[in-house]
Image: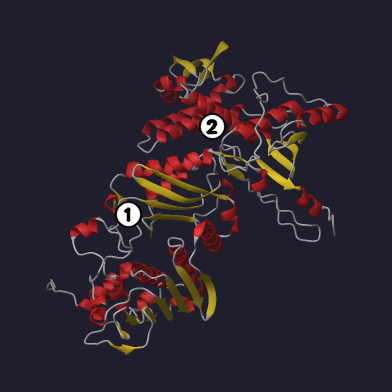
Amino acid sequence: MPLIRVLPDTLVNQIAAGEVVERPAAVIKELVENSLDAGARAIEVEVEQGGMVLMRIRDDGRGIARDEMALALTRHATSKIASFDDLERVATLGFRGEALPSILSVSRLKLVSRNADAEHAWELGGAGHIEGAEPRPSAHPFGTTIEVRDLFFNTPARRKFLKSEATEFRQLQQALSRIALSRFDVGFALRHNNRRVFDLAPAAGDGGRLARIRAICGDEFVAQSEAIDETRLGMRLHGWIGLPSVARPNADLQYIYVNGRLVRDRLLGFALKRAFADVMHSTHHPAYIVYLELDPAGVDVNVHPQKTEVRFRDANRVHDLLFGAVHQLLRRLRPEPERHHQVAFSPPDETPSGPTVLPGYVARGSAPAAMPQWRPAARLDLREAAPPRYGDAPPAAAAMAETRAAADGDARPLGTPLAQVHGIYILAQNDQGLVLVDAHAAHERVLYERLKQQLADGGVPAQALLVPEVVSLAEDEADALEAQRDTLHAYGFELDRSGPASVLVRAVPPLLARSDIGALLRELVGDETRRETAAHFGEALDAQHRVLADVACKAAIKAQRRLTLAEMDALLRDMERTELAGQCNHGRPTWMQITVAELDRLFLRGR
């Protein structure tokens, strides 16, 4: 057996570098965070060849005194904590004292700094280590510059794991952009191979902050997001929540900051995803920039060497704040054509790119003062509606008269119905142009929200069947339904066990009186099983809502159901009153806007 020995400092630092310094982007993150902790108000980053050849970070912070420069490059040396009590309430981004010595151990590093008390700057550096080196005078303004060259020059195996220059630079740029979104009061500049990539001035006020977000996240996110700011439970949550219309196929526009620190946290991510549960397609991810502020004693940031993971003292309380605040924000949204991102048409002389559907919304309370008051309109109810009509549509003259009558009075965001297209879509006219509505998807949302409200008020009404229906099931399915009989009663179902592999259904929700009860009950078995085994964070309620979503989907208007203009109008008015009306229960859009300008463009008017 080999003898136990103490590892040399150089090797210890290189081991630590494997935890802290994964690629050039990690170096930028650590050094820029040090600059922010030093009080910098302007940070410039210059890199060459994706950071693999050179990374230079210059700031106007407090600087480092001559006598402390060598100490700054020593492992576990820091000015940010001095006792265990400090570690319990970390308020800085860096505190482990590992970044500088770890970076030094795998690069050629030069540190130049000048603090307010010094007549000139001092410089210190080395290649892998600085043993015996002394600081020497240098010319430099107040602040610090750290230059990192030839990353992993002495660990070639690590260097082989780096990607292409373009890939490494993209990661580096993203790392700096994430930090820039955490500190709007600081200016950030980035240059790559002597080319300016961005130059973000300090952002003052809402306009300045939105300008920075636009530069990093794009115009679409700014146009299709809502500000959030809520303080409760001793915490504050603020930032911007992307509307369902800017859901993305990847989770690449999700920024969560805890006390100014960008984190990856499954609890927070789960709470936000759950808030979008029934307004977003399962294959998409929400977009958001959110900031959580709480007592530092309530969060442990000393979990991961890269300080990207945290642990909360009261995870349930944090989850409830995020889920509740975002969920309520989304439920305040109503269709708003003025903010609606319309269908992207290509004129005849351009290559069509296909329609892009991005519904728009506005939060209640943030609408213009002239927002109309909706007058009562008849609700569309399948129990009272006439049987499906497959004959001729109403005569043109009668239809026009009905349309003109419906158009009198207050303006309506979703407009006045004109016709039904292919038995699926409702065509309406509003002040902006044409509105297309997927009747099934829209009605599904209206019914779903109505059922949820009924459940919250004490239970979904039940309608007794004239002749009870016997439903044949697998024996284990019948067992599961029998075990959940009381729960199903709250959904409007009344059933009894009628045999080893069957149940007798005596009543159903009124909306399902004409539906395939057996098929729905088989689906409910799976949902009830998931609800029974749900462990935490309101998953039981989510399972209940999945049941109601199934009920709404089966009861909603089906394709080829011929609607009268009055029925179309009732559905549009219901949509305007219904929360989350822009998406069906599966996250698909329910309507889109085509503006007059787009119609003019399509037909080359004005050219």
Quadrant assignment, res 150 = bottom left
Cα–Cα gap, marks 2 and 1: 35 Å
The x and y percentages for residue 263 are: 38, 57
Residue assigned mark 1: 310
Quadrant assignment, res 136 = bottom left
Say which amino acid is labelled 2.
Ala
Q: Is residue 493 left or right of residue 27?
A: right
User: Circle 1 — which element?
Assistant: loop
Say which amino acid is labelled 1.
Val
User: Circle 2 — which element?
Assistant: helix
The x and y percentages for residue 540 are: 41, 32
Q: Compared with residue 231, is residue 483 higher up or lower down, i.e. above or below?
A: above
Q: Compared with residue 339, is residue 564 higher up or lower down, i.e. above or below?
A: above
Residue assigned mark 2: 549
Q: Residues within 10 Å of mark 2 (few under 14, many from 20)?
A: many
Q: Residue at x 59, y 22 (%)?
A: 511
The x and y percentages for residue 514 are: 62, 20
Quadrant assignment, res 16 = bottom left
Residue 357's label in the rendered image is: none
Q: Residue furthest bottom?
A: 137
Q: Is residue 505 left or right of residue 109?
A: right
Q: Residues within 10 Å of mark 1 (few under 14, many from 20)?
A: many
125 vs 334, nearest the viewer: 334
Q: Quadrant of the N terminus?
A: bottom left
Q: Residue at x 79, y 57 (%)?
A: 347
